[in-house]
Image (spheres, rainbow, N blue to C red):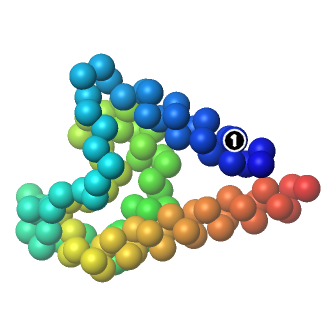
Amino acid sequence: MKRLLVFVSIFLILLTGCAPGYTVRLSTPGPNPMVNQPDASGRIAGAGEGLWHGIISPVTLVMSFFDPNVHIYEVHNSGSAYDIGFLIGLLILLAVISLFLRLRR
C-alpha cells in the first residue's frame, strides 16, 4: 500500500510539474526522421552505442541541464537496434545500482 501511495504521489507531481499552458498528452512519441541518417561526421549509432548511452544516461541527463548541446538519446541511430541497446544499458545500470544497494546492507 505504501509503494502505491509513493507511485501515485510521484505521478501527480510529474503531472503538475508541467509548464502552464502545456497540454499533457498520454501517447507514444512520434517518428524520428533522423533514423539511419548519418551525423556530421558520417556515423550512425548502433546497438553498441545505444548500450553505452543507456548506461551513462544519468550523467548525460545532468549534463544536459547545463549544456543545450548534450542530449540523452542519439537521434542519428539505426532504429530498433539502438533502442534495444539503450534499454539493455538502462537495465544494466539499474542492476548494478540494485546490486550495490543490496551489498551495502
Instruction: Give above or below for 53 relative to 20.
Output: below
At a point 67% along the width and 65% down the height, the residue shown is 96
Instruction: Give above or below for 79 relative to 41.
Output: below
Q: Position of residue 21 (x, y in %)?
A: 24, 22
Q: Which amino acid lies under the numbered mark 1 shown in the image of this protein?
A: Leu
Q: Position of residue 7 (x, y in %)?
A: 62, 45
Residue at far top of view: 20
At a point 30% along the width and 79% down the height, the residue shown is 81
Disc 1 crowd rating (10 Å Cα; few below 14, some 14-19, many 20+) is few
Q: Is any part of residue 82 visible from this angle?
A: yes
Q: Position of 63 compared to 31: left or right? A: right
Q: Position of 102 compared to 20: left or right? A: right
Instruction: Give above or below for 94 relative to 57.
Output: below
Q: Position of residue 56 (x, y in %)?
A: 47, 56
At a point 40% along the width and 38% down the height, the residue shown is 63
Quarter occupied by the C terminus:
bottom right
Q: Position of 64 compared to 15: left or right? A: left
Q: Is any part of residue 41 visible from this angle?
A: no
Q: How many marks?
A: 1
Question: Foreground: 11 or 42?
Answer: 11
Residue at far right of view: 105
Q: What secondary structure is marked by label 1?
A: helix
Q: Position of residue 73 (x, y in %)?
A: 31, 56
Residue at far front of view: 1
Q: Which residue is mark 1?
A: 5
The image quarter containing residue 76 is: bottom left
Q: Position of 3 compared to 44: left or right? A: right
Question: Foreground: 98 or 38?
Answer: 98
At a point 68% along the width and 59% down the height, the residue shown is 97
Instruction: Give above or below for 58 relative to 86.
Output: above
